[in-house]
Structure formats: C-alpha cells, structure tokens
C-alpha cells in the first residue's frame, strides 16, 4: 500500500522520523513546530501547505508532547482536514490516546504511538488502541512497518512502557545530581558501564529533550500523585532553559 503521510510535531522526534520516512520511500509532508531546531536533511512544509494536501493523505503522525493545548488544536485540525478513513497516530507520551480521542469527531481513527529519540538506534515502536476499532490498529502496524519499526501493542497509558521507564531513570539521576551524590559525568558513566546502557541517563535526557521528559513525568504524576513521579528540580530547570532557547 502506498502511503502519503502528514508528519507534524516537535523536534527532535519529528525531523528524525521524517528522515526515516525518506529513507523508507514513504511520501511525507513534514511540518516542524520549531523549525530552527530541525534537520536540514528534510524539506519542511508550512502548516497551510501540509493541510492543503490533507485530502490526499492516507495517514497523519502527530508528535506534540510538551504543550497539551497545542496538541489538542493540532489533532482537531488534522481531524477536520483529513478524510474520515485516514489514520492518525498520536504521540501518547504525555496524553493517553483514549483521552486524545475524546477531542475528535472521528475518534475511531486514532492510535497512540510511543517513540523516543534517537530514532537512528530505535527498532521498536509501541502502539496503543484509543478505541475498540481494530482496523486503525492494523493500519498503524502496517505504516510503522513500512517505516522500518517492529511494533509492540501495549495498553493505552500516558508514557507507554519504555518511555515511562526511561523518564523515571532520568529523574532518579537528576535527583542524584541535584543532591550532590555525583557529577553528571560520573552518573552517566556509572549507568553506562554498570548496567550496560547505551548512554547515560542525563545524556539521554538531552537527546530526548528535557521538556519531553518532564511532560511524561508530569502526566504520570497527575495520574498517580503519590510522589514517585515528582520531577527533580534540576530536570525541570533544564527543561525551562531548553524552552527559552527554542522561543
């Protein structure tokens, strides 16, 4: 099946997925919400240009994690612009797919997607059903397979499985750093050598985006407000600094 995909969201995930689509010969119209942070390896579209092609798209992938208001507006715009049969994959790192589905006129087309950068080292994607429409889940598996991902189906929840675990590891490392247990370099080295992680948690936080990690943890804390997902002060400070640079 030939795919024509609208890809919209934040860096670094959106540009990285665009590069992957290009390598897989999947036609993608790409709009990055912070173009100054995007890669030069992909041609980017204005939002208006991408939406003008929406009636011809077979799917859209929405990757907004750090601004729930913008995420909702983006999904609703896609829902209105696409044909009712077109699939929408939505990042469920900070908002469960079932919740996002309540924002749409055609909720049965929505499927949750959990991915973490760097995509150059990622071979698996998690998907979660937002509704009981199995056809949308099947379409999501096909599209992600064409993009070169193995697909794991998980229960719908903010953060998915791997992103939730990684965010919690990063948060614990950030608490250790803030409490003066060790330097950032020592913490990363200990985790990399001690448990054979491909990178230290603090380096990984920078690659994922501090704001995205904070968004995952805040969503989890809202669901389980018992303190286990409380964001480390150092991590929230880094997210604010990163946001200021992007503005």
Image (spheres, rainbow, N blue to C red):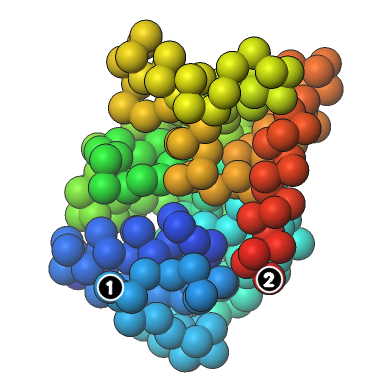
Crowdedness of circle 2 by 10 Å Cα count: few (<14), some, many (20+)? Answer: few
Contact (Cβ within 8 Å) of mark 2 with mark 1: no
Q: Quadrant of the N terminus?
A: bottom left
Name the residue rendered at 40%, 36% in the picture: 126
Disc 1: which residue: 41
Specify the farthest residue to the top.
Answer: 194
Q: Which mark is residue 187?
A: none
* Above or below 98: residue 73: below
Q: Quadrant of residue 85?
A: bottom left
Residue occupied by mark 2: 247
Q: Residue at x 50, y 76 (%)?
A: 35
Q: CA distance from mark 2 to mark 1?
A: 22 Å
**Considering depth in this image, is 245 or 88 the residue closer to the camera?**
245
Look at the numbered disc 1 and give the secondary structure of its residue. loop
**Picture quadrant where residue 96 is located:** top right
Element at badge 2? loop
* Image coords of residue 245 (percent x, y): 64, 64
Residue beneath the point at 56% across and 71% down: 34
Label 1 crowd (10 A; few <14 / some 14-19 / many >=20): few
225 or 155: nearer the eye?
A: 225
Q: Position of residue 95 (x, y in %)?
A: 66, 44
Location of residue 132 in the rendering, given as x and y in whole percent from the top left corner: 52, 40
Q: Quadrant of the C terminus?
A: bottom right
Residue 8 in view:
no
Q: Residue at x 32, y 47 (%)?
A: 119
Q: Earlier in the sequence, mark 2 or mark 1?
A: 1
x then y, percent, for residue 226:
82, 16
> What is the count of numbered marks?
2
Q: Is residue 186 left or right of residue 238?
A: left
Q: Is residue 9 visible?
A: yes
């Amino acid at each position: 099946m030939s795919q024509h995909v609208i890809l919209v969201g934040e860096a670094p995930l959106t540009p990285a997925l665009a590069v992957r689509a290009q390598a897989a010969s999947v036609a993608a119209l790409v709009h990055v919400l912070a173009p100054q942070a995007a890669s030069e390896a992909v041609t980017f579209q204005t939002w208006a240009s991408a939406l003008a092609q929406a009636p011809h798209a077979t799917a859209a992938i929405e990757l907004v994690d750090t601004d729930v208001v913008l995420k909702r507006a983006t999904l609703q715009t896609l829902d209105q612009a696409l044909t009712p049969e077109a699939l929408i994959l939505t990042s469920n790192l900070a908002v469960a797919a079932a919740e996002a589905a309540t924002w749409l006129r055609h909720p049965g087309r929505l499927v949750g997607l959990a991915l973490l950068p760097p995509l150059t080292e990622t071979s698996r994607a998690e998907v979660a059903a937002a509704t009981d429409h199995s056809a949308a889940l099947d379409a999501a598996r096909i599209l992600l397979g064409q993009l070169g991902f193995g697909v794991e189906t998980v229960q719908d929840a903010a953060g998915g499985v791997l992103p939730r675990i990684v965010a919690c590891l990063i948060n614990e490392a950030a608490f250790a750093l803030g409490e003066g247990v060790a330097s950032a370099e020592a913490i990363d080295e200990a985790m990399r050598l001690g448990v054979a992680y491909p990178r230290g948690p603090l380096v990984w936080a920078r690659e994922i985006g501090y704001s995205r990690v904070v968004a995952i943890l805040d969503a989890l804390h809202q669901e389980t407000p018992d303190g286990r997902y409380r964001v480390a002060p150092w991590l929230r400070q880094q997210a604010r600094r990163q946001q200021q640079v992007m503005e």
